[in-house]
Image: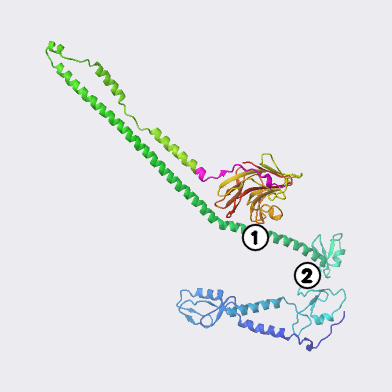
């Protein structure tokens, strides 16, 4: 090996600034050391007496002085009647941070082994010599292949084979071990795939980069999902407030209708009371009149009975009282008082309550949409529409429909009817094979290009079924949901509240996703089918 040359000290005169800086940093470190923890200041603060400490250190000291007559400085014993207010020393904090970072940099640097008088940063390390060299010493270093040069390092033990003490230059892909030449010839790795370390390093790095890219992509998707959920979380209070307000309106309406029904029933009771009272009063009057007649007849009969002369008794003008008795029996039967119509009252009450409940269902619960028919004029020529306008199927045969501005280029079809200011739902059934998507859209959606896809724009909202998985998409952002257990889906629209929800019609029905936004135009049901898929409107 070629001997190293001895260079005069003048050759290193270009490096004094680093040495001087190192010495200056060492002196400055003493001034930046906390007297309590004996480390560089961490978030330094200054007391009123002028001494500096780490915030955590001085707070611990002051905590021990709680309850004493006064607080004191640990260095000068200056007393403070109240606990000192800790003021951050920003300048000292910045200087301490700079020195700490410079110290870390110096600890990471590798210096030339042969520059013994002045520390000089090494540019390479020789594994054979186990020495680090600066640019000047590197020029005189041997160029033979045995002298393997690598990036500067302080560790040499892990660069050599522990068994053969030779430089590790190969990598066994099967055992994931770094090898020397002798290891490659040994029995343990014979027949294994062995690569040069640099090549294995490049391959590993490329694979790791691919994994990193996948992790980044997954992280971005998670971030999008988190943002979407956070947006939904922020919308929940508004959504809840809307539901609460609708429920309050319904209860106010119910109370008003119940009060009206109560008044109506009470009025009916009062009316029946008045009618029955008048009827009973008339009967009482009739009976009182009959009673007076009977009293007169009784007096007449008593006068007759008091006559003792038979002749005079028989000559008296007497009437036949049989008719009077029969008339009296008939009048008693006809004077039965009418009763209050309690059955009729409760029938009126029950009927009124049923009307209230029926009105509640019509006013609050969602109604099934009717009359959803697919618009052939919007259907692309790769979509077949059934005769009843309820089913859209992907077709390999061009349907040959004439071109118009409303027709989609690929896969899609709109309904004939749109909806606004309503609360309703519509159901569909899709195929197990292929890919299909259902949702709602503004009629101004593009008819061709990427922007015409459901959910690829801010004009449409869609749910997709593909390979037994559900996902939702809006404005180009698609989020996976869950596996498909039923191929029947319900699309629920509350236009006024800005809610569009998707449900899976399994047993039980399962909520999949809800969009909360503000709708500004009528919404049309939209269907997309591809790869032998079909979708049927069930409503």
Q: Quadrant of residue 136?
A: bottom right
| Residue position for label 2 | 158
| Of residues 41 and 338, the one drawn nearer to the viewer in this rendering | 338
Residue 412 lies, with reference to residue 153, above or below; the image says above
Q: Check contact, mark 2 vs mark 1: CB within 8 A.
A: no
Which quadrant is the N terminus positioned in? Answer: bottom right
| Of residues 197 and 220, the one drawn nearer to the viewer in this rendering | 220
Q: Position of residue 326 (x, y in %)?
A: 27, 18
| Residue position for label 1 | 223
Residue drawn 68% across the image and 39% down it: 387
Q: Quadrant of residue 101?
A: bottom right
Label 2 or label 1, whichever lies nearer to me, is 1
Relative horizontal placement of residue 494, taking residue 196 as reference (left or right): left
Q: How is the image coloured?
A: rainbow
Mark number, residue 268: none
Mark 2 and mark 1: span between their CA atoms?
Answer: 40 Å
For the magenta stretch, what is the residue range?
A: 360-381
Residue 367 included in the magenta stretch of the image: yes
Q: Position of residue 280 (x, y in %)?
A: 30, 30
Residue 237 included in the magenta stretch of the image: no
Q: Position of residue 144 (x, y in %)?
A: 88, 76
- Secondary structure of residue under mark 2: helix
Residue drawn 31% across the image and 26% down it: 336
Relative horizontal placement of residue 432, taking residue 349 as reference (left or right): right
Mark 2 or 1, nearer chain start: 2
Relative horizontal placement of residue 171, taking residue 434 as reference (left or right): right
Residue 523 lies, with reference to residue 4, above or below; the image says above
Residue drawn 57% across the image and 50% down it: 495
> Tag 1: Cα neighbours inside 10 Å, few (<14), some, or many (≥20)?
few
């Amino acid at each position: 090996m070629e001997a190293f040359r001895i260079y005069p000290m003048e050759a290193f005169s270009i490096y004094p600034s680093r040495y001087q800086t190192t010495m200056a940093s060492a002196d400055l470190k003493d001034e930046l050391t906390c007297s309590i923890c004996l480390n560089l200041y961490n978030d330094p603060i200054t007391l009123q007496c002028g001494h500096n400490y780490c915030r955590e250190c001085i707070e611990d000291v002051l905590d021990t002085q709680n309850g004493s007559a006064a607080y004191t400085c640990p260095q000068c014993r200056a007393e403070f009647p109240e606990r000192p207010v800790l003021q951050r020393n920003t300048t000292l904090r910045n200087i301490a941070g700079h020195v700490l970072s410079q110290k870390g940099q110096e600890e990471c640097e590798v210096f030339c082994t042969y520059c013994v008088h002045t520390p000089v940063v090494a540019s390479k390390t020789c594994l054979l010599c186990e020495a680090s060299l600066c640019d000047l010493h590197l020029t005189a270093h041997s160029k033979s292949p045995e002298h393997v040069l690598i990036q500067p390092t302080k560790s040499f033990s892990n660069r050599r084979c522990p068994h053969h003490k030779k430089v590790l230059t190969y990598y066994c892909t099967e055992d994931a071990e770094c090898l020397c030449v002798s290891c490659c010839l040994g029995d343990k790795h014979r027949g294994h795939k062995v690569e040069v370390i640099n090549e294995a390093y490049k391959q590993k790095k490329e694979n790791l980069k691919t994994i990193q890219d996948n992790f980044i992509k997954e992280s971005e998707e998670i971030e999008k999902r988190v943002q979407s959920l956070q947006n939904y979380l922020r919308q929940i209070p508004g959504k809840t407030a809307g539901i609460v307000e609708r429920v309050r309106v319904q209860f106010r309406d119910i109370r008003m209708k119940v009060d009206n029904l109560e008044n109506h029933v009470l009025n009916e009771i009062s009316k029946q009371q008045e009618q029955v009272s008048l009827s009973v009063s008339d009967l009482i009057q009739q009976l009182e009149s009959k009673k007076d007649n009977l009293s007169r007849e009784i007096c007449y009969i008593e006068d007759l009975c008091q006559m003792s002369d038979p002749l005079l008794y028989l000559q008296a003008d007497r009437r036949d009282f049989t008719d009077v008795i029969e008339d009296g029996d008939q009048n008693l039967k006809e004077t039965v008082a009418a009763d209050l119509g309690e059955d009729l009252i409760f029938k009126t009450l029950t009927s009124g309550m049923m009307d209230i409940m029926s009105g509640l269902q019509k006013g609050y619960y969602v109604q099934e949409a009717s009359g959803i028919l697919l618009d052939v004029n919007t259907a692309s020529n790769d979509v077949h529409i059934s005769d009843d306008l309820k089913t859209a199927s992907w077709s390999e045969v061009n349907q040959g429909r004439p071109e118009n501005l409303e027709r989609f280029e690929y896969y899609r079809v709109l309904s004939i009817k749109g909806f606004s200011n309503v609360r309703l739902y519509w159901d569909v059934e899709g195929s197990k094979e292929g890919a299909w998507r259902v949702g709602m859209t503004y009629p101004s959606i593009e008819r061709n290009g990427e922007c015409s896809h459901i959910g690829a724009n801010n004009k449409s909202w869609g749910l997709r079924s593909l390979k037994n998985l559900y996902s939702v998409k809006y404005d180009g952002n698609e989020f996976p949901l869950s596996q498909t257990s039923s191929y029947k889906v319900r699309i629920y629209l509350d236009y006024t509240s800005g809610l569009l929800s998707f449900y899976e019609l399994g047993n039980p029905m399962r909520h999949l996703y809800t969009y909360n936004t503000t709708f500004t135009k009528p919404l049309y049901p939209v269907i997309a089918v591809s790869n032998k898929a079909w979708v049927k409107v069930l409503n």
